[in-house]
Image (cartoon, grey):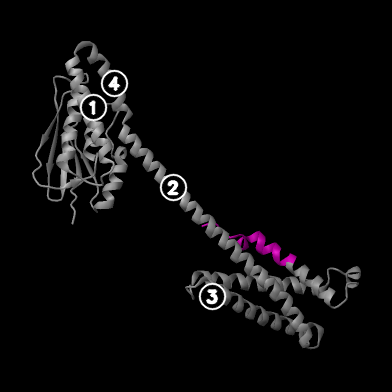
Amino acid sequence: MIKLFIHKPLFRLLSPIFSGVIVYLLILLVNNNVAQLQNEFLGEELYVCIGMSYIIQEFSRLLLLLFKRVKFFTNELISVIVQIIVSMLLCVGLVTIIISFYYKSILGFSANSEELWLFNSIFCSITIIYILLFISHQYLHKINSEKLKEEEIYLNHIEQDFNEFKQGINPDLLFESLENLLVLIKHDKEKADDFIDYLATIYRYILSSKQKQLVHWNEELESTEVLVKLFNYLPYRNVSILNKLESSFLIVPRSLLFIVEQIIRTTIISINVELIITIEEEKDKFIISYATNDKITSVFSIDSFKEIERIYGIYSDYKIEVISTDSTRTIKLPKLTTK
């Protein structure tokens, strides 16, 4: 939190000097003794006023901090009124003690009620101004903080929408597929038709799944198998999925689709060596595993599907795990169910 300006050393050092001078001038005006300024401005009374301003402002600041840290009242209006009343009583008490001590010890006689009333009224006015400065600045800081939080939430929503849009459009897959489609149209139109059907099926599923929070794993697996068929049309791709799932559970839409695509894109694949992606299950998780043969330029990383991890965190306490060894990589995702 940004420190309020009344707590900054420069303000605490200079403001009592200014307010002390104002108090001194007001007392001279009330007593009709302005001519004293011509003889001696930096008099003993001026230093007393400045010293009293230091003491009262510091006590008022500590009192405000106490009310801020210890919530005596839940209602803000009542809390502000009580702060003002307590600060006024503190100010009256301090001014009365200091003025009485000054008059008896320095001047040699006691202060009368009119003089005490004058000093108390002026210093209480300054205390009220000080409290209002604190409350107004605190209120403005609260309003600005709320606006910043709203902007941060709005920015997060925009980023999430952009990530979902980017994940839904999947420009890499789209452009790569279109390039391969141009080649297939020239050489094999039947394969080109099948390729278009696969591509349309994938994007149809991606667009329709945006309206769903969770889907059955079998529905996601069907689209993932279509994705694998699509990739097998591309050069130097030889991929297959081995499904060992038996139980019924739900998953986040496009999560399996995205992870399988990342596996294919980050693994070195050749026509002679098949990439087998195995999908099996444990008690509370389902597992995706494959033999690692990572590319140099594109390395598999859990950071690439943070959005999926965030969504899974909404529905489950289990986190996505990635376990890598020299020969295999295992990705564990939580099973989701509806109660």
* Amino acid at circle 2: Tyr
* Amino acid at circle 4: Leu
Give the number of callouts.
Answer: 4
x%, y% of residue 155? 44, 45
Answer whether residue 14 is magenta in the image. Answer: yes
- Secondary structure at badge 3 equals helix
Q: Which of marks 4 and 2 precedes in the sequence?
A: 2
- Residue 297 appears in view: no
Name the residue located 28 percent from the left edge and 27 percent from the top edge: 173
Q: Which residue in the protein does label 1 denote? A: 199
What label sits on residue 52 in the rendered view?
A: none
Q: Which of marks 3 and 4 precedes in the sequence?
A: 3
Q: Which residue in the protein does label 2 denote? A: 154
* Cα–Cα span, label 1 and label 4: 9 Å
| Magenta extent | 1-18
Name the main secondary structure of what is drawn in magenta: helix
Residue 51: quadrant of the picture:
bottom right
Q: Which residue in the protein does label 3 denote? A: 78
* Amino acid at circle 3: Ile
Q: Which of marks 1 and 2 precedes in the sequence?
A: 2
x%, y% of residue 49? 75, 73
Q: Mark 2: few, some, or many residues within 10 Å (few <14, many ≥20)?
A: few
* Cα–Cα span, label 2 and label 3: 34 Å
Q: Which residue in the protein does label 4 denote? A: 178
